[in-house]
Image (tube, grey):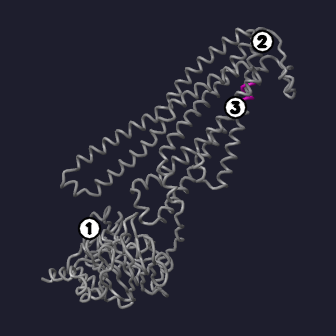
């Protein structure tokens, strides 16, 4: 509960405390209404027996002069007051409960937004520690479990607990013996139910969260690898696995939903046993009128006590289950505590990028994944307008170096500067001046134009600018052949496009902001030689003011580079033009000979 409350701002905690306190005070209305019912019963029994009755309580409310009224008037007024107070209390509770739920739901949305912001502020290494589905669950369903399931249920729990305390105190004033018996019965049953079920419900909550994440992960897995699954005949395997996980999840959720019903049925039995016990004790120790009055008061009080005990029991179980369901979210919150704040959203782009100089300096750079050193004391200076190809065998550290250059990873030691500042600061200061094209292009189920201006509104990047990028990426003929042109929808993950078309959309996306520094991670690997040649020529035509850093294997890509940076086991073996690198690195020379031959 305390961990959950830390997610709320101070003013929200004050509001929640104030509303919860008001709900607690509503319990006083129940005490008054039950007391009125007790008086009403005594008057009714005496009235039936044609006896006059004078109660001290009647003397204490002289403004309605009950002692001066007829039997029928007393019954009508007391009954009406008791019923009105109970109804008024119930209506107020409904209104307040609704407001609390809406309040917590909105706060949950804000917490989700804040958590997403924190996750996006993490380094790539930390983000990749968790699966995509776990992150999605943690920032959505997990947050709901905390706000509604833990905080909301706790607020209701406090209000219902205070009602029991007030009601027990009122019964003790009226009849100590009845209050003791009522407290022992309901408290004892509630405690036994708690001991029997609280561990089980928490375990079920954790299991439900794990199964939900696992199920979603497998669905995404088979859909994203549909072709491979088809050829390998693994679709039925996935379908059976997902079915089994969903059945297990259904059983866990069904058991969680049923467990509160156990409390309901046990309390129904407890109410009957309690009524019999109270009746026996009252008729053995008191006269008939007092016994009937006490029985009526007990039954009236039980209409409030039993539901309150049931809500408390269900609330405790709900909190335990929600804590289990929220475990991934609570873990993620701890992980992102020190995440830096994201820069303010600034959609404006200065397409000239004044003041930005596409120069890079890498000084004594080292980087390790956990204990494995991937890059060792790298020193590189890249001047404005140079076209640099990073080459090396698989596992040499090429992609890691690229991630460090674009700022998604942070060096362990050493530094990287772009235009005199860190990559992150350069991105913030000159938005759009730096572009990145990955090997695998992320595409959304939208139009070609939406995918090219991804993340920017049309007010910032116009269709004219999109068309210019389309031409640079050698996509013009393809777009013109489509009935809807730029407004053609490409399907989820570009399902209606070829691999080369996807790659060219990624290149167009990079070029649309008129960048001065372009990073390309095998960005032309899915293109045919002619298209790659045309795009390379386009990039070269951008002028000497454009710097390009790319990871490459294909000879056509390497040949357009001014310099080659050859990596081997995290170290720079050579950095210079093709001739110099061939002289320095025998493996590279052999590779170039084979390609040319």
The residue singled out by tag 2 in the image is 46
Whether residue 256 is visible to the viewer of this picture, yes or no, is yes
**Which is the main secondary structure of the residues drawn in magenta?**
helix
Q: Residues within 10 Å of mark 2 (few under 14, many from 20)?
A: some
Q: Nearer the viewer, mark 3 or mark 1?
A: 3
Distance from the alpha carbon under mark 2 to that under mark 1: 89 Å
Query: Upstream in the sequence, badge 3 or badge 1?
Result: 3
The residue singled out by tag 1 in the image is 497
Query: Upstream in the sequence, badge 2 or badge 1?
Result: 2
Which quadrant of the structure image shows residue 393?
bottom left
Q: Residue at x 46, y 36 (%)?
A: 256
Q: Which residue is drawn at 85% across and 21% down?
A: 56
Which quadrant of the structure image shows residue 177?
top right
Number of on-image labels: 3
Q: Residues within 10 Å of mark 1 (few under 14, many from 20)?
A: few
Which quadrant of the structure image shows residue 410?
bottom left
| First to last magenta residue range | 30-35
- Residue 344 in the image: state x and y as whole percent: 54, 71
Please tell me whether mark 2 sits on a helix, a strand or a loop. Answer: helix
The residue singled out by tag 3 in the image is 165
Query: Upstream in the sequence, badge 3 or badge 2?
Result: 2
Q: In the image shown, does 301 or 411 lie closer to the viewer? A: 411
- Whether the magenta-drawn stretch holds residue 65 is answered as no
Q: In the image shown, does 29 or 133 lie closer to the viewer? A: 133
Distance from the alpha carbon under mark 3 to that under mark 1: 68 Å
Please tell me whether mark 1 sits on a helix, a strand or a loop. Answer: loop
- In the picture, measured across the screen, residue 280 lies left or right of residue 489, that is right
Q: In the image shown, does 33 or 170 lie closer to the viewer? A: 170
Q: In this view, does 86 lie above or below 545?
A: above
Q: Is residue 87 above or below residue 588?
A: above
């Amino acid at each position: 509960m305390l961990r959950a409350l830390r997610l709320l701002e101070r003013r929200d905690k004050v509001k929640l405390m104030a509303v919860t306190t008001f709900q607690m005070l509503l319990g006083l209305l129940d005490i008054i209404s039950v007391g009125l019912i007790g008086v009403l019963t005594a008057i009714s029994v005496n009235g039936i027996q044609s006896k006059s009755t004078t109660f001290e309580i009647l003397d204490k409310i002289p403004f309605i002069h009950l002692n001066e009224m007829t039997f029928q008037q007393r019954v009508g007024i007391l009954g009406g007051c008791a019923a009105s107070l109970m109804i008024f209390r119930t209506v107020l509770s409904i209104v307040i409960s609704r407001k609390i739920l809406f309040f917590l739901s909105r706060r949950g949305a804000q917490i989700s937004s804040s958590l997403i912001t924190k996750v996006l502020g993490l380094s790539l290494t930390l983000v990749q520690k968790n699966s995509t589905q776990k992150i999605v669950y943690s920032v959505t369903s997990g947050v709901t479990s905390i706000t509604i399931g833990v905080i909301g249920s706790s607020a209701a729990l406090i209000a219902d607990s205070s009602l029991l305390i007030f009601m027990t105190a009122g019964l003790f004033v009226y009849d100590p013996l009845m209050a003791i018996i009522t407290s022992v019965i309901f408290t004892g049953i509630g405690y036994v139910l708690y001991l029997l079920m609280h561990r089980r419900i928490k375990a079920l909550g954790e299991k439900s969260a794990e199964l939900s994440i696992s199920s979603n992960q497998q669905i995404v897995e088979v859909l994203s690898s549909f072709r491979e699954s088809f050829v390998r005949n693994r679709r039925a395997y996935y379908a059976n696995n997902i079915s089994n996980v969903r059945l297990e999840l259904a059983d866990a959720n069904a058991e969680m939903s049923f467990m509160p019903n156990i409390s309901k049925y046990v309390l129904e039995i407890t109410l009957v046993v309690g009524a019999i016990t109270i009746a026996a004790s009252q008729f053995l120790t008191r006269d008939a009128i007092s016994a009937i009055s006490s029985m009526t008061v007990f039954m009236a009080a039980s209409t409030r006590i039993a539901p309150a005990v049931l809500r408390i029991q269900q609330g405790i179980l709900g909190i335990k289950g929600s804590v289990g369901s929220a475990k991934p979210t609570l873990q993620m919150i701890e992980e992102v505590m020190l995440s830096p704040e994201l820069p303010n959203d600034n959609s404006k782009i200065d397409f000239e990028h004044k003041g930005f100089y596409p120069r890079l300096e890498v000084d004594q750079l080292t980087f390790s994944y956990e204990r494995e050193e991937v890059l060792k004391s790298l020193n590189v200076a890249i001047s404005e307008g140079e076209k640099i190809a990073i080459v090396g065998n698989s596992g040499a550290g090429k992609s890691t170096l690229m991630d460090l250059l674009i700022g998604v990873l942070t060096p362990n030691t050493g530094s990287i500067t772009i235009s005199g500042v860190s990559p992150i600061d350069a991105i913030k200061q000159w938005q759009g001046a730096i572009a990145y094209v990955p090997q695998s292009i992320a595409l959304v189920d939208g139009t070609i134009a939406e995918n090219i201006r991804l993340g920017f509104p049309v007010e910032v990047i116009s269709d004219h600018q999109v068309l210019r990028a389309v031409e640079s990426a050698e996509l013009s003929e393809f777009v013109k052949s489509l009935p809807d042109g730029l407004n053609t929808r490409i399907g989820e993950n570009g399902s209606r496009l070829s691999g080369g078309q996807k790659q060219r959309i990624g290149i167009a996306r990079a070029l649309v902001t008129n960048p001065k520094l372009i990073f390309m991670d095998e960005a032309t690997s899915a293109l045919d030689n002619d298209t790659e040649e045309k795009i390379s020529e386009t990039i070269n035509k951008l002028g000497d003011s454009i710097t390009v850093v790319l990871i490459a294997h294909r000879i056509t890509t390497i040949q357009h580079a001014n310099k080659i940076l050859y990596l081997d086991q995290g170290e720079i073996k050579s950095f210079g033009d093709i001739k110099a690198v061939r002289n320095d690195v025998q493996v590279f020379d052999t590779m170039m000979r084979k390609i040319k031959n």
